[in-house]
Amino acid sequence: MRQALDEAGGAAKLLVLGARWQLLQPTCFRAARERTELIARARKDARLCFSRPQPSPRFYALSTFTPEQVRQDESTPGNRPSSFTEASAASSAYKKR
């Protein structure tokens, strides 16, 4: 998708992809995503973790968190961007960890 956007003259544009968590594979998160943001929706009780700091024989960190914990964490700043469709303006909230 990134290559097609670049060829169509959108090399300076940011590509934003949205997906359901269940449809994503670990390769989606490991792949190089230059000028691309991946937004995934997950269940609020899903157990998530970061990759393990190098060097380590483990791939994932031992500590886990849930999207619900991130949502309720006051120390994590939240954003409320506006988006517009043909019918109306919509508002959503997200946090980036």
Image (spheres, rainbow, N blue to C red):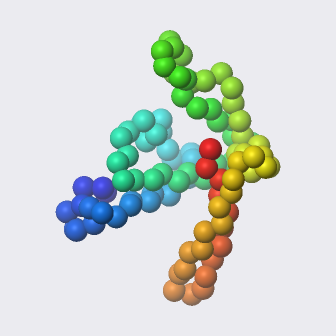
Vertical relation: 60 (above or below) 89? above
| Image label count | 0
Q: Residue 63 at what x, y percent from top left?
A: 69, 26
Whether residue 22 can be seen here: yes
Answer left or right for 19 relative to 97: left
Q: Residue 62 at what x, y percent from top left?
A: 65, 21
Residue farthest along the top direction in this orientation: 57
Q: Nearer the viewer, residue 11 or 49?
A: 11
Image quarter of residue 7:
bottom left
Vertical relation: 80 (above or below) 83? above
Image quarter of residue 64:
top right
Residue farthest along the left direction in this orientation: 7
Q: Residue at x 39, y 53 (%)?
A: 36
Q: Residue 48 at what x, y percent from top left?
A: 64, 36
Vertical relation: 68 (above or below) 14? above
Image quadrant holding the N terminus, namely: bottom left
Q: Residue at x 60, y 24 (%)?
A: 61
Whether residue 5 can be seen here: no
Image quarter of residue 78:
bottom right
Image quadrant holding the C terminus, namely: top right
Q: Nearer the viewer, residue 89 or 44?
A: 89
Q: Residue at x 34, y 64 (%)?
A: 13
